[in-house]
């Protein structure tokens, strides 16, 4: 059983500070939905509003089309997984998992049965009598999930639960979380500042900044068609090219920058006019070193400053004539031995891979 | 010898001066302030009560008479047991237990409020207002309560003056004043261990329990109280031990008809000039209280080590 979750004009204020402002979003039943944003953007506040720990100052939270105002966290069909997991250290693993059943007066045998079922779901069979501190980080993670699932909530809320794990484990837990979500088929609402986590696990993501929603959409949509300079630079990396619009050709706009003219694609909802201050974005992986026969819409002269080796990629840091910085990545399989610090080269990129947006502040500012 | 001592890890770690200070301070504290006086008291409690000049003489010998007096009374008494002293003793232990429980019930909600609900500035204000009244000494606080509870005291005058009662309530005669005074006397020693224990609980634990459907009562029962158990035990132990041994409060507030056991001890020492018997009574109080506390700890499955946490 899963449920829709709808935030309708939700604002949360602390004094005169808006932690969340006019948030409208509808999460569909059975969906894996992520709120993505930098720390302090209000995503945790929204999660607390959904779970019932924080009443919205304005607007409504609806779960299954039912208004949740005045309903406490212990009465909502949601379960929250805390950032630090908040497992009960004085109880055994089984007692932790069955706690929600215990408080509902479920008999001891029934509790044991259900705990064993859930232990199986999280691949910890026979470990129910252990104390929490005897488990590894990943195991604790899974126990927290099992504990939240024990009451069969319609919505599972996850507050950056993977942030304390090391990289390998984090990657494995992403897959595992996704699998558990498919198996139990309930709505997952996930909070994170890690765009990699959000992109790999979610059906849809909502990007937040300073309490407001910047964009909602499927992962590739948000990545390929960011609606704001903030989203463009927060989700993945992007090189900004600042300038003025000098021409419009269909859905393309020509931008005049200090370093030359480029052609970039406009977003349907963010039409530009000639003379507008704007930014064209091009991602490091969309910048290419032209080979014979390549013909790119845009060419850009750069001077290589430094480079770093990431494994699968080599990242080059270069400067333009105006002093603006640009980063581009080349797959490790391509030979780049001729490119060294100080060399001047020409890069190319396609107008279809470059987005032009009205000027606004970036995520990295 | 010196070299052996100074090469010990303790000396290396702390340096000579600090290490010597620690050793001397601890030995002085333990030997001079604890072991020697208690040992003399123990010795005295097994000796006959003779004037200083007769000490070491033929009349000064070891005996159980003071202990047997506590249980069976004087040799000339007609009763089989010393009902008076045993009664005072039993009542002291029993009332102290009730005082401890009352303290716990009073302090737990307040400690929880200060530790987990109040915002930091309110919490600081509350803690300060708990501490400041205790700058007034115990004797003065007891007298202040006496003024309140006396037959012609503030409360009775108010109640009869307003016309709620025709006649004042005998707060002192029924020892209501005493019980109130005893509860108030050591309340901070319950409050602070409780506060510290609850304060260290991660707020997410409480929220997690709530999110999983737990009522407030059950969250306290299953999460907060088990976490705070070491604080509860250390608070209860201190309050019980100090209440059992309280003197100033009972002297001021107990009814003329009843005695608190330390008053009895005081009488043997000071009014009857029988230090041996006073010592024996003190030793009895000490041993029984310790056994009582240890038994309680066993019943509630607490180990000594947990208290110090």
Image (cartoon, coloured by chain):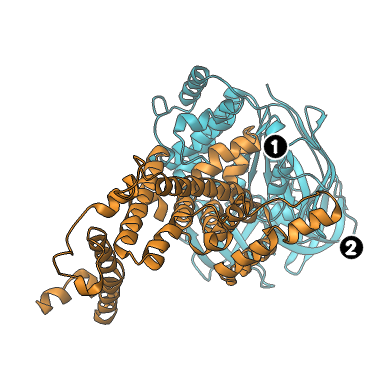
Asked if residue A354 shows in the view, the reply is no
Residue beneath the point at 48% across and 46% down: B91
- B78 is higher (above) or lower (below) than A130: below
So how many labels did they put on this image? 2
Relative to A161, is B268 on the left or the right?
A: left
Residue beneath the point at 63% across and 63% down: B130
As drawn, the chain in orange is: B
Q: Nearer the viewer, residue A68 or B75?
A: B75
Asked if residue A109 shows in the view, the reply is yes
Residue beneath the point at 63% across and 48% down: B109
Instruction: Give the residue at mark 1.
Output: A73
Mark 2 element type: loop
- B205 is higher (above) or lower (below) than B279: above
Extreme-bottom residue of the structure: B17
Share a chain, discs 1 and 2? yes
- B85 is higher (above) or lower (below) than A117: below
Instruction: Give the residue at mark 2.
Output: A275
Mark 1 element type: helix
Q: Residue A43, percent across and down?
A: 70, 48
Q: Chain of mark 2?
A: A
Q: Nearer the viewer, residue B222 or B213?
A: B222
Extreme-left residue of the structure: B1
Relative to B170, is A94 on the left or the right?
A: left
The Cα atoms of the two marked residues, 1 and 2, are separated by: 52 Å
- B60 is higher (above) or lower (below) than A14: below
Relative to A185, is A212 on the left or the right?
A: right
Q: Quadrant of the N terminus of chain B?
A: bottom left
């Amino acid at each position: 059983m899963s449920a829709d979750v709808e935030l309708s004009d939700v604002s949360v204020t602390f004094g005169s500070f808006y932690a969340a402002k006019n948030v409208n979003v509808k999460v569909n039943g059975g969906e894996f939905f992520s709120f993505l944003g930098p720390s302090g953007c209000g995503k945790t506040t929204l999660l607390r509003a959904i779970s019932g720990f924080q009443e919205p100052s304005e607007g409504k939270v609806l779960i299954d089309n039912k208004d949740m105002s005045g309903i406490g966290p212990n009465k909502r069909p949601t379960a929250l997984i805390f950032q630090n997991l908040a497992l009960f250290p004085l109880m055994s693993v089984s007692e932790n998992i069955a706690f929600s059943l215990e408080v509902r007066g479920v008999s001891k045998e029934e509790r044991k049965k259900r705990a064993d079922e859930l232990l199986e779901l999280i691949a910890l069979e026979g470990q129910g009598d252990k104390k929490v501190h005897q488990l590894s980080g990943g195991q604790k993670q899974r126990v927290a999930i099992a504990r939240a699932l024990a009451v069969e909530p319609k919505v599972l809320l996850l507050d950056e639960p993977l942030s304390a794990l090391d990289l390998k484990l984090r990657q494995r837990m992403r897959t595992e979380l996704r699998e558990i979500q498919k198996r139990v088929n309930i709505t997952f609402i996930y909070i994170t500042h890690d765009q990699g986590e959000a992109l790999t696990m979610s059906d849809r993501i909502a990007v937040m900044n300073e309490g407001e929603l910047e964009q909602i959409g499927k992962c590739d949509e948000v990545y390929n068609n960011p609606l704001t300079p903030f989203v463009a630079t927060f989700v993945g990396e992007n090189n900004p090219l600042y300038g003025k619009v000098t021409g419009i050709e269909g859905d393309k706009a020509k931008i005049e920058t200090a370093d030359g003219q480029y052609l970039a694609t406009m977003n349907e909802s963010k039409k530009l006019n000639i003379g507008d201050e704007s930014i064209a974005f091009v991602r490091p992986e969309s910048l290419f070193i032209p080979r014979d026969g390549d013909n790119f819409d845009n060419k850009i002269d750069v001077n290589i400053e430094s480079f770093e080796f990431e494994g699968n990629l080599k990242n080059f840091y270069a400067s333009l004539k105006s002093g603006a910085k640009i980063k581009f990545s080349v797959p490790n399989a391509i030979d780049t031995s001729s490119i060294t610090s100080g060399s001047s080269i020409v890069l190319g990129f396609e107008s279809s891979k470059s987005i032009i947006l009205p000027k606004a502040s970036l995520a990295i500012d | 010898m010196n070299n052996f001592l100074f090469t010990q890890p303790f000396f290396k770690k702390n340096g000579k001066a600090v290490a010597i200070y620690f050793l001397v301070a601890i030995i002085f504290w333990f030997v001079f302030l604890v072991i020697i006086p208690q040992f003399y008291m123990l010795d005295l409690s097994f000796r006959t009560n003779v004037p200083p000049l007769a000490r070491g003489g033929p009349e000064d010998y070891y005996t159980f008479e003071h202990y047997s007096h506590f249980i069976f009374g004087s040799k000339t008494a007609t009763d089989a047991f010393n009902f008076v002293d045993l009664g005072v003793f039993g009542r002291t232990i029993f009332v102290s237990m009730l005082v401890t429980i009352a303290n716990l019930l009073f302090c737990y909600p307040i400690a929880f409020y200060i530790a987990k609900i109040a915002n930091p500035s309110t919490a600081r204000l509350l803690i300060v207002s708990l501490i400041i009244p205790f700058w007034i000494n115990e004797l003065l606080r007891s007298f202040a309560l006496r003024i309140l509870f006396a037959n012609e005291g503030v409360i009775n005058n108010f109640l009869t003056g307003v016309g709620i009662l025709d006649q004042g309530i005998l707060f002192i005669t029924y020892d209501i004043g005493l019980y109130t005074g005893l509860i108030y006397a050591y309340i901070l020693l319950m409050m602070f261990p409780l506060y510290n224990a609850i304060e260290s609980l991660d707020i997410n634990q409480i929220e997690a329990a709530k999110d999983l459907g737990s009522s407030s009562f059950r969250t306290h029962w299953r999460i907060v109280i088990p976490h705070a158990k070491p604080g509860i035990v250390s608070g209860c132990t201190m309050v019980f031990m100090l209440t059992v041994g309280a003197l100033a409060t009972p002297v001021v507030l107990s009814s003329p008809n009843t005695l608190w056991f330390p008053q009895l001890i005081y009488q043997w020492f000071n009014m009857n000039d029988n230090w041996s018997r006073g010592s024996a009574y003190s030793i009895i109080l000490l041993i029984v209280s310790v056994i009582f506390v240890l038994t309680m700890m066993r019943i509630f499955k607490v180990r000594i080590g947990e208290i110090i946490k």
